[in-house]
């Protein structure tokens, strides 16, 4: 298997150290609740680096939500929803619907952004976790 670039590993939610193991079980929009693996199934890296590590992902998720709210609001305006008081609840409804639709993606990528880009000392180690032949 060809090695993934950092961005490919990020997009595919792969472990930041070996870029082979999955960080999550299941897909983002499956009916089963998605779960973060405790350890990388390939190199055994512990994803929760310290107690409460994923609380920081909440701040990343917050930034993602603000970006989505602004995008949906501006897109609604550009697509023809007039900015008048009578349309207030249309804006609120569209924004809530969009944010709910994006929440599984926010859950995943806030943690992946945290692991790949915001954790000091966590780097790609080529061949980590490979079984010695
Ligand atoms: Zn790994």
Image: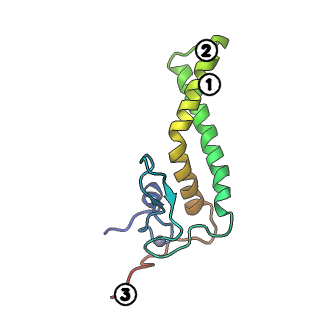
Residue 1, horizontal then vertical, whole percent: 31, 69
Inter-mark Cα distance, 3 to 1: 56 Å
- The residue positioned 67% from the left and 13% from the top of the image is 85
Residue 78 image position (x, y, % from top left): 53, 21
Q: Residues within 10 Å of mark 2 (few under 14, many from 20)?
A: few
Instruction: Specify which label sits upstream in the sequence, 3 or 1.
Output: 1
Q: Height in image: 117 above or below 76?
A: below
Q: CA distance from mark 3 to mark 2?
A: 63 Å
Near-viewer residue (69 or 33): 33
Question: Residue sitting at 54 percent across and 23 percent down?
Answer: 76
Point 67% across, 50% down: residue = 59
Mark 3 near mark 2, Cβ–Cβ under 8 Å?
no
Query: Residue 49: image x %, image y %?
Result: 62, 69
User: Which mark, by number, is residue 92?
Assistant: 1
Helix, strand or loop status at disc 2 = helix
Q: Are marks 3 and 1 in contact (CB under 8 Å)?
A: no
The numbered dot on residue 87 is: 2
From this view, report whether residue 54 is shown above or below residue 103. Answer: below
Q: Nearer the viewer, mark 3 or mark 1?
A: 1
Per the image, the residue denoted by label 3 is: 132
Q: Quadrant of the C terminus?
A: bottom left
Residue situated in front as seen by the camera: 9 or 109 = 109
Residue at screen point 42% across, 63% down: 5
């Amino acid at each position: 298997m060809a090695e993934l670039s950092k961005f490919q590993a990020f997009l595919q939610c792969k472990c930041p150290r070996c870029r082979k193991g999955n960080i999550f079980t299941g897909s983002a929009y499956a009916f089963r609740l998605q779960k973060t693996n405790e350890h990388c199934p390939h190199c055994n890296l512990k994803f929760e680096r310290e107690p409460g590590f994923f609380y920081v992902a909440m701040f990343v998720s917050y930034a993602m939500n603000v970006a989505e709210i602004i995008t949906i609001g501006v897109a609604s305006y550009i697509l023809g929803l007039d900015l008048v008081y009578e349309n207030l609840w249309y804006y609120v409804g569209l924004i809530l619907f969009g944010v709910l639709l994006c929440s599984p993606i926010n859950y995943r990528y806030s943690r992946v952004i945290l692991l790949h880009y915001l954790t000091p000392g966590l780097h790609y180690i080529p061949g980590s976790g490979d079984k010695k032949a």
